C-alpha cells in the first residue's frame, strides 16, 4: 500500500511540475525584464540559469543510466526506482522554473498571421507531446505502473505513430512548444535554447541505454527512423 501511495505522489509531482512549467513559461517568463542601471544585465542571469538547468540535467541524465539505477535499488524496492527518479526530477524541474532569472530583451514579437502561426506551432507541440506520452503510457513514465505490476519490466518499444516520424517525439513536441512562442522574451529564449541544447547532448547517452535495454530491436529502429528530434534536420 505504501509503495503505491509513494508512486502516486511521484505521479502527482510529475504532473504538477509540468503544469508549473507551463505557467512559468507562458506567463511568468513573458514579463519584460529590465537591464541593470549600467546597461548590463545579460551575463549574470544567463550564467545563473545555465547552472540551474545543469543541476537538473545532471540528475535527469546521470540517474537515468543503468549504473545509477542499480545504486537506487540497493536501498529501495526495485519497483520504486522509477517513482523515486520521477519525484526527484519533478522537484528539481519545478525549482529550476521557480528560480529562473529574468533576462532582458525581446528576441521577436509576432503579429497578424505570423502570431497565429506561432500559436499553431505551440499547439502542435502540445499535441505531439500528448500523443507520444500516451503511446508510452504516462503511468509508466511516472513510475506507477512498475509498482502496480511489482516489477521493473521495461515498456514495449514503440516504433509507429509519432515514433515513426522521429525517435524522440516528446523532445520534438518540446521544441515546437518553446520556440513557437509569438512573444519571445530574453527569459523565454534562454530557457528554450538551454533546454534544447541539453536534449541534443543527452540523446546519444539515452539511446545508448535504450540499446542496452532493447538490443538489436532498437538498432533496427534507428536505421528505420533516421531523425532523432526534428524531421529532415536532426
Image: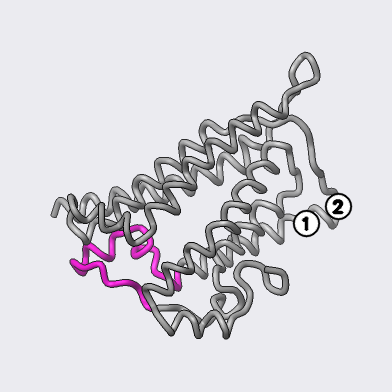
The residue lying at 43 percent from left, 74 percent from top is 211
122 displayed left or right of 89: right
The image quarter containing residue 214 is bottom left
Q: Position of residue 81 (x, y in %)?
A: 27, 56
SS class, disc 1: helix
Q: Which mark is residue 116?
A: 1
Asked whether 145 falls inside the magenta stretch, the response is yes
Contact between labelled residues 2 and 1, with CB atoms less than 8 Å apart: yes
Asked whether 146 falls inside the magenta stretch, the response is yes
Category of crowding for the residue at label 2, using alpha-carbon neighbours closer than 10 angstroms: few (below 14), some (14–19), many (at least 20): few
The residue lying at 56 percent from left, 75 percent from top is 162
In the image shown, does 186 or 30 lie closer to the viewer?
Answer: 186
Position of the N terminus, as image quadrant, is bottom left
The image quarter containing residue 116 is bottom right
Task: Kindly identify which residue carries mark 2.
Answer: 112
Of all residues, the one furthest to the left in this rendering is 1
In this picture, which residue range is highlighted in magenta?
Answer: 134-156
27 displayed left or right of 81: right
Amino acid at each position: 500500500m505504501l509503495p503505491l501511495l509513494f508512486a502516486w505522489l511521484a505521479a502527482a509531482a510529475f504532473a504538477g511540475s509540468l503544469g508549473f512549467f507551463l505557467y512559468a513559461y507562458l506567463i511568468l517568463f513573458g514579463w519584460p525584464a529590465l537591464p541593470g542601471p549600467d546597461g548590463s544585465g545579460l551575463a549574470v542571469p544567463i550564467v545563473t540559469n545555465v547552472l540551474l538547468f545543469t543541476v537538473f540535467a545532471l540528475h535527469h541524465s546521470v540517474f537515468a543510466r543503468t549504473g545509477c539505477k542499480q545504486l537506487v535499488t540497493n536501498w529501495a524496492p526495485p519497483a520504486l526506482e522509477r517513482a523515486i527518479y520521477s519525484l526527484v526530477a519533478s522537484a528539481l524541474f519545478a525549482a529550476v522554473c521557480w528560480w529562473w532569472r529574468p533576462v532582458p530583451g525581446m528576441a521577436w514579437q509576432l503579429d497578424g498571421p505570423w502570431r497565429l502561426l506561432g500559436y499553431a506551432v505551440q499547439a502542435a507541440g502540445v499535441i505531439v507531446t500528448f500523443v507520444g506520452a500516451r503511446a508510452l503510457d504516462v503511468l509508466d513514465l511516472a513510475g506507477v505502473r512498475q509498482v502496480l505490476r511489482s516489477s521493473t519490466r521495461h515498456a514495449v518499444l514503440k516504433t509507429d505513430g509519432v515514433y515513426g516520424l522521429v525517435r524522440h517525439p516528446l523532445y520534438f513536441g518540446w521544441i515546437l512548444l518553446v520556440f513557437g512562442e509569438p512573444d519571445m522574451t530574453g527569459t523565454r529564449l534562454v530557457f528554450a535554447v538551454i533546454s534544447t541544447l541539453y536534449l541534443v547532448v543527452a540523446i546519444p547517452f539515452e539511446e545508448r541505454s535504450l540499446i542496452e535495454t532493447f538490443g538489436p530491436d532498437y538498432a533496427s529502429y534507428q536505421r528505420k527512423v533516421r531523425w532523432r528530434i526534428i524531421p529532415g534536420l536532426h
